[in-house]
Image (cartoon, rainbow, N blue to C red):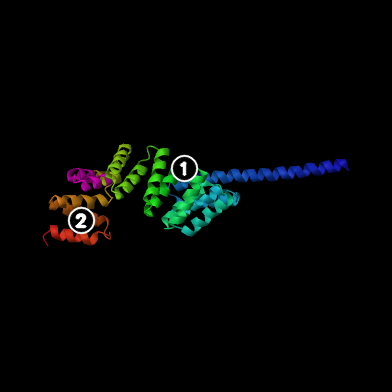
């Protein structure tokens, strides 16, 4: 009896070990598929990425990473409902998964669910207090909601964590500009340009400060730099056109206003620009 019992125990253990080995092998295969999916996603091959993440989920249904990555691929494809479903599943599997909250927050922000976005970014920060992008992204949403001081606090924390984060300086400067705190604004735009000399939006914003201070020639120089670095960015054409019009330079103003309308044919300023064009052309 004892010998039989020992044989039975040994056999049972062998089965357990075999199953454990299969599960481990499946998890290893799933991880390899996740890596392949991430490479495909980074290369813009989203269908291939989704297929790899889906296969990884089949092999390891407990992988929060696979669900989160597939959610991001779905989001990039514009398949919003599927993306939300995957982010929710990732967080159901791992409620402490900071990246899952962050990615879901980005999706909420892009679909206009700003309150939910702030909630998800805040949860990300609770779980990962040094997540620079979470502070930055929450700052963006707070600025959109008109919460200027909260936005400044978030951008400032992002800068504290990443002192060379040019976009955070530019965005904080934009909030200061809205508050008419021009000295603080221009300091931030200067710093953003120092970090990233090709940052067209920072040149454009610094040009706006120059124009408001009456430094029209300097403003034109900054708007020109913005256009040189980001020729498809519409705003500096409009701003430089206004500056040329203010200086009485009709021809370059017309050129800039027309360039803006080509880039933004349905922009909010279209009717005003068309009126200026008629004025400048003597119509």
Magenta stretch: includes residue 214: yes
Q: Residue shown at 38%/48% (left/top)?
A: 149
Quarter in which the N terminus is drawn: top right
Answer yes or no: is residue 7 visible. Answer: yes
Q: Position of residue 159 (x, y in %)?
A: 39, 40
Q: Residues within 10 Å of mark 2 (few under 14, many from 20)?
A: some
Q: Residue furthest right?
A: 1
Using the rendered view, name the quadrant where residue 229 is placed. top left
Q: Is residue 79 left or right of residue 170?
A: right
Quarter in which the C terminus is drawn: bottom left
Q: Main secondary structure of the magenta part?
A: helix
Q: Position of residue 2 (x, y in %)?
A: 87, 41
Q: Which of the pair 249/83 is nearer the observer?
A: 249
Sooner in the amino-acid sequence: mark 2 or mark 1: 1
Q: Residue shown at 41%/38% (left/top)?
A: 160
Answer yes or no: is residue 48 visible. Answer: no
Q: Which residue is mark 2?
A: 258
190 lies above or below 90: above
Q: Which residue is mark 1?
A: 131
**Magenta segment, which residues?**
205-224
Closer mark to the observer between disc 2 and disc 1: 1
Q: Residues within 10 Å of mark 1 (few under 14, many from 20)?
A: many
Q: Is residue 41 left or right of residue 253?
A: right
Q: Residue shown at 50%/56% (left/top)?
A: 84
Q: Position of residue 147 (x, y in %)?
A: 38, 52
Magenta stretch: includes residue 129: no
State the count of labels: 2
Between the C-alphas of marks 2 and 1, the distance is: 42 Å
């Amino acid at each position: 009896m004892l010998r039989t019992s020992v044989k039975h125990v040994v056999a049972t253990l062998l089965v357990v070990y075999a199953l454990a080995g299969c599960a481990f092998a499946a998890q290893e295969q799933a991880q390899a598929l996740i890596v392949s999916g991430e490479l495909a996603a980074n290369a813009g091959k989203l269908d291939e990425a989704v297929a790899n993440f889906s296969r990884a989920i089949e092999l390891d249904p407990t992988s929060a990473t696979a669900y989160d990555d597939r959610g991001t691929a779905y989001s990039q494809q514009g398949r919003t409902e599927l993306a939300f479903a995957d982010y929710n599943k990732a967080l159901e599997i791992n409620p402490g998964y900071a990246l899952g909250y962050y990615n879901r927050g980005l999706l909420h922000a892009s679909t206009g669910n700003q309150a939910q976005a702030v909630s998800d970014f805040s949860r990300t920060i609770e779980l990962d207090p040094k997540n620079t992008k979470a502070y930055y992204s929450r700052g963006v949403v707070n600025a959109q909601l008109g919460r200027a001081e909260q936005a400044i606090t978030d951008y400032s924390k992002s800068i504290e964590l990443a002192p060379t984060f040019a976009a955070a300086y530019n965005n904080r400067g934009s909030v200061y500009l809205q508050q008419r705190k021009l000295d603080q604004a221009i300091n931030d735009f200067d710093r953003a340009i120092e970090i990233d000399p090709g940052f067209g939006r920072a040149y454009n914003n610094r040009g706006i400060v120059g124009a408001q201070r009456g430094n029209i020639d300097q403003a034109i120089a900054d708007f020109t730099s913005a256009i040189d670095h980001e020729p498809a960015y519409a705003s500096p054409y409009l701003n430089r056109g206004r500056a040329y019009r203010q200086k009485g330079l009709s021809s370059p103003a017309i050129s800039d206003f027309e360039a803006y309308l080509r880039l933004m044919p349905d922009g909010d300023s279209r009717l005003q620009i068309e009126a200026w064009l008629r004025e400048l052309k003597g119509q």
